[in-house]
Amino acid sequence: MTRSAVQLYTLRNVDRPFTEVLELVADAGFEGVEFAYRVTEADTDEVLATLDETGLDVAGAHVGIDELEDDFEETVAYYDDLGVEHVVVPWLDAEHFESVAAVEAAAARLTELADELAAHGMTLHYHNHDHEYTDLGDRTGFDAFVDETAFPIELDLGLALAAGDDVVERLRDLGDRSRLVHLKDYDVAGGESVPVGEGDLDLDGVADAVADNDSEWLIYEYEGADPLDSLERAAERTNELV
């Protein structure tokens, strides 16, 4: 059964203690959170206590590839203490998608990390932007990356849409590799993230694909200003889609 969460990058500019941000998420009606960078600045015990008090579960965490490669054991131990099972590499530079050889190298690099994380009971995912969709002739760089890997893909629906992808078809093609999904609505003509329901995403199609894939989490993300103004409505809409 798919559940609702928010990527905490959405609330990156909310000037409140991190634990209060978690409380805002719970009050809005989300079931879980996906961590981003601010969690590393907070006290782990206080975070765990707040999660317990609010009933929020941990959908996953975005963790930079350098952090994983440069200090693997300490990084894994830290996120394990927070109850993280899904570790998402949120970014690789565009150069890694500029040729088939570059994609193959990136895929091998992340596959090695995926194997190491699996040995610690964690699952690696890759989160796309739009720069992965380079034209390699017969397919895009993102197509090649998906073909060259077996670990899950956290599809950012808005950025995939911005790149010209058919996101519903992509979700269906990913199947059980689509365990975490980023619900980011996007105004293609305006070139910007918008509150869910105000952009060009086929929300009904997304909901059907997520249900058919039995994805674990539908994770709301919004990059615009004043995220608190639309947070409760976003939670309501996300919960309607799961």
Image (cartoon, rainbow, N blue to C red):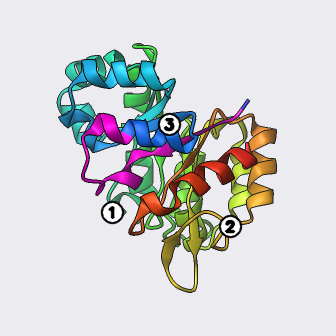
Q: Residue at x 36, y 57 (%)?
A: 96
Q: Where is 196 relative to 176, above or below?
A: below
- Disc 2 versus disc 1: distance between alpha carbons? 28 Å
Q: Badge 2, how many Cα within 10 Å: few under 14, some, many 20+?
A: many
Numbered label attached to residue 201: 2
- Evaluate whether residue 91 shows in this view: no
Q: Which mark is nearer the camera, 2 or 1?
A: 2
Q: Residue 48 lies in magenta, yes or no?
A: no
- Disc 2 versus disc 3: distance between alpha carbons? 25 Å
Amino acid on which disc 1 is placed: Glu
Numbered label attached to residue 95: 1
User: For the residue labelled by badge 1, is the local secondary structure a helix, a strand or a loop?
Assistant: helix
Which residues are the magenta region?
Answer: 2-21
Quarter holding residue 52: top left
Quarter holding residue 242: top right
Residue with the most extreme front position? 27
Q: Where is 156 relative to 72, above or below?
A: below
Q: Which mark is nearer the camera, 2 or 3?
A: 3
User: For the residue labelled by badge 3, is the local secondary structure a helix, a strand or a loop?
Assistant: helix
User: For the residue labelled by badge 2, is the local secondary structure a helix, a strand or a loop?
Assistant: loop
Q: Where is 171 relative to 21, above or below?
A: below
Q: Nearer the viewer, residue 110 or 240?
A: 240
Amino acid on which disc 2 is placed: Leu
Numbered label attached to residue 26: 3
Q: Position of residue 47 (x, y in %)?
A: 31, 25
Amino acid on which disc 3 is placed: Ala
Q: Residue at x 21, y 32 (%)?
A: 42
Residue with the most extreme bottom position? 189
